[in-house]
Amino acid sequence: MTNRIIISHVQTGWNLLLLLTYAKENNFKKIIVLKEREIILDNFLHEDNTVFESIEFHDVSTIRNKILLFLKIRKIKGIKLFLKFTNFSFFGQFLQKFINFKNSVFLDDGTVFLNILDKSITYTNSMKAFIKKLLWPKGYEPSFSEFKDVDIAYVSNLSIVSNKLSKFTTKFIDVGDFFSYESMKYICDNCFSYKKEIELWKKEMEEKDTLVLGSSLVKHNFINKENYRKIINSNTLSENFIYKPHPNEGTVMKDLNSSLVSSGLPNIPIEMFLVHCAPKKIISFGSTTSFWLKYSNLNIESKIFMIEDFFTPASINALDGLDVEMISYQEKS
């Protein structure tokens, strides 16, 4: 049998969970994971995992390690598929350009459709963006809508942005083609061990009806702490909720009553808990979790608030196809 290996450069625990779900649904048994930072989720992997033949983790946080892995991957025999989650990884784009992969797949790990819809949304300042584009492998510049040499791209809520992707030769597929909460739960139950954490989660949710998901809006300089807190507070006043900070949120909401903040849980995807104990309602502010609930059969009321100050009028109109409520942190005149 031909050796089929999926190679992926992951950035987060959510990336890892999606990678394993994709690999299982597409019958890949051997996986090579490249990571540049600690990913807590890999500490929860079953040692006696029977879903895959092998899952190799390689640290590529140093230039030396990157070079060694690059040379190793080039020598691997068989069918090699490259799965990437972002176009903003220099090493990932470098691998795609200089290694002869059988196929390259882009997997939207969040809300890439929003950035395709409205290119005015930026996550870095102009000077950093200029330097990145200057150094990046030619043709593989950092951009949400860069699909050079990508054979297949899985995008969430594809129908909203499909008209903006017609110029590409890439085959675009909605993530729902391979992803569902049921397929993800299979990976959670058969590849990871976190029973104690599930029980802790269930205990936290016993007396709460609503889960409020934090975001990384402050970290990405979209909004300051004061306005972020104002938006959170004004849209959760009547809720019996528990607040789950975003992994990149830091201490933005540190002054929130401690009894309202989820604590003691490891920094692993919240979806891994939702498949075992879901709240009646989820409130979010553009969170991936809320947008991806459409791929579940969970009986959860979802309330998605989007901050209109970040979008152009045309993009706001396009979002009418989603069940979202536009809000603003600025005073109306």
Image (cartoon, helix red, strand yellow):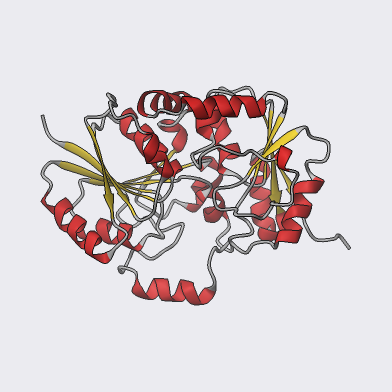
Q: Residue at x 27, y 56 (%)?
A: 96
| Picture residue at 20% right of the left edge, 44% below the top | 80
Q: Is residue 224 visible?
A: yes
Q: Quadrant of the N terminus?
A: top left
Above or below — where is 240 with respect to 162?
Answer: above
Q: Is residue 327 visible?
A: no
User: Horizontal and vertical percent for residue 129?
Assistant: 47, 71
Q: Residue drawn 58% across and 64% down?
A: 120
In this rendered view, identify the residue nearer to me: 111 or 318.
111
**In the drawing, does residue 330 fall left or right of residue 265?**
right
* Quadrant holding the C terminus: bottom right
- The furthest residue to the right: 333
* 161 sits to left or right of 331: left
* Quarter residue 200 falls in: top right
Residue shown at the point (60%, 53%) measured from the top left: 249
Q: Position of residue 181 (x, y in %)?
A: 49, 27
